[in-house]
Image (cartoon, coloured by chain):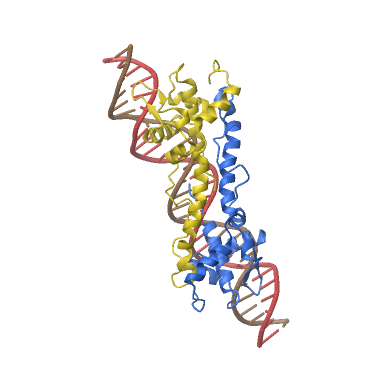
Chain colours: A blue, B yellow, C brown, D red
Amino acid sequence: MQISSRFTLAVHIITCIDTFQNDYKVTSEFLASSTNVNPVIIRRLLGQLKNAGLVEVARGSGGASVGRPLNEITFLDIYKAVECVEDGELFHFHENPNDKCPVGRNIHNILDDKLRRVQQAMENELSSITLADVTEDLEKYLNKTQTC
Amino acid sequence: MQISSRFTLAVHIITCIDTFQNDYKVTSEFLASSTNVNPVIIRRLLGQLKNAGLVEVARGSGGASVGRPLNEITFLDIYKAVECVEDGELFHFHENPNDKCPVGRNIHNILDDKLRRVQQAMENELSSITLADVTEDLEKYLNKTQTC
DNA sequence: CTTTGTTGTAACCATATTTGTTACATTGAT
DNA sequence: ATCAATGTAACAAATATGGTTACAACAAAG
């Protein structure tokens, strides 16, 4: 099962805010135009990112800005902000294995630490990448005078 | 989003087959009893595992057996057999970012190799764990005279 | 203090995926 | 031939995602 597009969408959004916040008021409409995603979806996602302290959003007057330096925002920060996967809960278990079967009785315990290692490996890699890496790559292509 | 229970279910199933195949005919009913999952779901999963060469299933006469030594069946083998995630497709993208926006035009390219590294880290860890590790742990708890 | 543009959120819908269930044709051994 | 089991189709239920309309709350500007 794929990880929902909320993650890539969130990376897109914060990158966009950083790129344009000095020259434009970056509203949900603005971001909807760049992503081609409904503005309400954008606002809901901005809400999650705001709760995680990654962006700031101005009520009333409008516009979003980045909450801290891009090299201090890791992919893991974003992942945890928008995907609701608790520690050790990446893999879903079938609910009621048979207690009377020695396999059924123990399978959850036996798998737990192994699957936690898998989740940890993934999260380690996510935490090694920051939004600064993204904007660094973006510089190669970027022509800031061109907006959405 | 969590990874579907097909994965943990598949690990459970193959472990069960290995544990009981010498003493019982391990049918989809038998496995349904141990997992507490509908027998048709079991058969569908066994079909995927069979296609991947991980188990053998006897039509007509019934019963499943393990296809190769447990230390040669990695979690990655099982994951790939039951989850349909192509290489570099673990993360879902929003479909049509705006080509006229420098961020929208480049975000997919910029993220692709980074997200591939994340997927690779996860799959590396999955490939480092085998079903032999599971049965080794299971031995500690196991009383083979007790079935489901 | 009213207007204006924006955010936050509720309500509802469509779609996709997962899991469960019934039903039954096909199969292989006895 | 019988019988138990598999493979699979058809459908249902539950859940998650993404989209849409609508509107109250809000902050700034006139």
Q: Is residue B27 visible?
A: yes
- The percent position of residue B39, horizontal first and vertical second, equals 45, 29
Q: Is residue D4 left or right of residue A128?
A: left
**Residue A75, quarter of the rendered image:** bottom right
**Residue D7, quarter of the rendered image:** top left
Between B85 and D18, the residue placed more toward the observer is: B85
Between C2 and A111, the residue placed more toward the observer is: A111
- The percent position of residue A143, horizontal first and vertical second, equals 49, 76
**Looking at the image, is D28 positioned above or below residue B133?**
below
Residue at x-position 33% and y-position 23%: B60
- The percent position of residue A37, horizontal first and vertical second, equals 50, 64
Q: Is residue B143 left or right of residue A58?
A: left
- The percent position of residue A120, horizontal first and vertical second, equals 59, 45
Residue at x-position 45% and y-position 73%: B100
Between B10 and A125, the residue placed more toward the observer is: A125
Residue at x-position 53% and y-position 19%: B147
Q: Is residue D25 left or right of residue B53?
A: right
**Looking at the image, is B128 positioned above or below residue A27?**
above
Between B126 and C16, the residue placed more toward the observer is: B126
Number of residue marks:
0
Residue at x-position 63% and y-position 44%: A87
**Looking at the image, is B49 positioned above or below residue B26?**
below
**Looking at the image, is B78 positioned above or below residue D4?**
below
Q: Is residue A3 visible?
A: no
